[in-house]
Amino acid sequence: MTDRIEVAATELRPLLEEFIMWARVNAPGSDPELVGPAALWHRLAFSQDLGTWKRADLRNLLLDRMPKVVEDPDAAADGMLPAVDAYLTFLSQTGRLAEGSDSLADLQAELDDVEDEFVDLMEDLLEDSEGDDDDEEAGDLGDFEPFADELAELDTIRLRPDSELAAAARAVPLVAKARDLALWVGSGRRVGEDTLLTDAEVEEALVAVGLPRPETDGPVAEAVPQLWNVWNLAVDLEFLEPGDANTVAVQDDTSEWPFDDDEDVLDAWMLGLHSVDYGDPELADDDLTMALAGLTRGVLVRLLLGGGSRDIDELAQELAEAAADLDELGSDAWEAAGDPLASAIDWLTGYGMVETDGRTLSLTPLGTEGVVHLVDDADIEVDARPAIESMSAHELLALSAELPEDEADAEFAAWMRLREPEKAAEELLEAAAEDESDALIRVQAASVVGTLGQAAIPAWQAALKQPSLRPYAATHLSQLEIEGAPEPTQDDTHWLILDMWTISAGLGRSEFVSSLQDIGPDMVNSLLEVIWKIPHAHVEELLDLISQVHPDKQVGKAARRALFKARSA
């Protein structure tokens, strides 16, 4: 179903854009945005020809189909019929109301006839939706929310290095097919209004992407859902782009796939990640198709919860039961599909996300990366971290800042076991110097490197050249009694205090106030007299905050004076 909707929407887009421009002048009181859903479902359910409209189809569209799909019944009750009236008038006046359609007058008469009933249906939908916040409509088979607690309880998921994932993405067959299709499309191919491509073009496209020609007595274009899925994937990947005057064109860099840069490869692969929906079964009956919507995502989340692998037969049984629970047509749809998992597994395999071994289905490293992103997109928490061996020092520091102390210590210990202490110190301090405004990363790095003793001396000496790290380097080198090392200055001490205040402020107002009270108002006042001179990234922000939150009014005044000096310096 998804691919049919995408194809129909692509066909409609130029016509709707022209209608919107027409409506601004000829029907300014109508809402053209309300026409889109009606025109789309007319195309999907009643007529392959965008210009053929019948009274009976119009009635069925408005009274049977639209109540099932309308998103805003209130807006539809007020504006849907005037918008459809304007659209039909536009078709008639521009010669697009096809021969064989009922006349514009008859269609408008039908709109008058159904008006009261349509408005009543929209009002019924509004009444049904009122007060139903706790009784939300059940999601489809791909809804991750029911698994949120289970996902949160999973053991840490280790994601593979980007270089390994990029190598796998370069070998993904479906991306290569999408590239080949886009290159076949060329620099400006005109697409049709009824079907994107003629049957002759479809046969050429099938050859270009290596898909077989189906045995069919009808139009070939209606018997190649896999080709349209690849077409939609090419659009998702930005290999294909709609152009002017009903044309589509290949993007300039498409021929360069697979790209040389790992980041570019993974960015492209992620653009096409939501193509997993194209793996859902498509049946002749739209209602049965919708009963299995989300099946492919349902496969992915169950594989993740299963530790990465599941028996296909057990997985099928579980999903069949879920389909029956979610939709009264679920069992019928499952039976009608024959082997519903086949299309899902075929697409996921083609996108490099799963592999099979006998009757066992498993996530690939690329698949694990992808489903973790999908879970994250659904705003569900899952503990996923880079593989220790591929984690950069900055990634380690950023991750550890969010972990409980014992977990952070374990991450640091595992990371340090993979490198010599001298190298670890160098990498950590270099990461800490990347962003002068990130006090937490800096303090973490200095704390860990401080445990490495003599091995960290070269890294500390190099860090003396970095203004944000010099206070830490001077302090630690002095503690190590290194000959010739500079003694920490008062400015160094003040920098360290500002870093501590920055971290404390990040923990919340009460934590910040408590940290100020711990050193007493006299000490704070003394610091305020001099600390404004320090070229710290957060000095003005901290002085402003002290002026607002410190319970001692005299301290607040001193902070405001210091802030004025800092801003004037």
Image (spheres, rainbow, N blue to C red):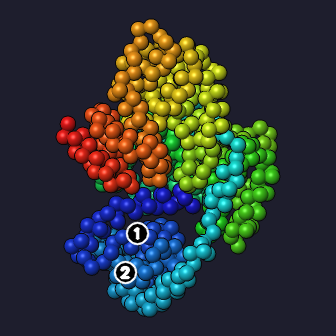
Residue 92: percent from the left, percent from the top? 31, 76
| Outermost residue, front side | 522
Q: Give whichever of 58, 343 is nearer the camera.
A: 343
Residue 54: percent from the left, percent from the top? 44, 80
Q: Which residue corresponds to mark 2?
A: 79
| Outermost residue, left side | 568
Quadrant, the N terminus:
bottom right
Q: Give whichever of 140, 494 is nearer the camera.
A: 494
* On screen, residue 349 above or below 492: below
* Label 1 secondary element: helix
* On screen, residue 409 above or below 213: above
Q: Which residue corresponds to mark 1?
A: 36
Q: How many numbered discs sit on the rendered protein?
A: 2
Give the residue drawn at x 33%, y 43%: 525
Residue 299: percent from the left, percent from the top? 68, 51
Quadrant, the C terminus:
top left
Q: Quadrant of residue 255?
A: top left
Q: Give whichever of 539, 191 is nearer the camera.
A: 539
Distance in Å between CA atoms under marks 1 and 2:
13 Å
Residue 314 visible (yes or no): yes
Give the residue drawn at x 70%, y 43%: 155
Going by the numbered disc 2, the residue's amino acid type is Gly
| Outermost residue, top side | 483
Tell me: 222 left or right of 53: right
Tell me: 479 left or right of 420: left
Give the residue drawn at x 56%, y 29%: 391
* Label 2 secondary element: helix
Going by the numbered disc 1, the residue's amino acid type is Gly
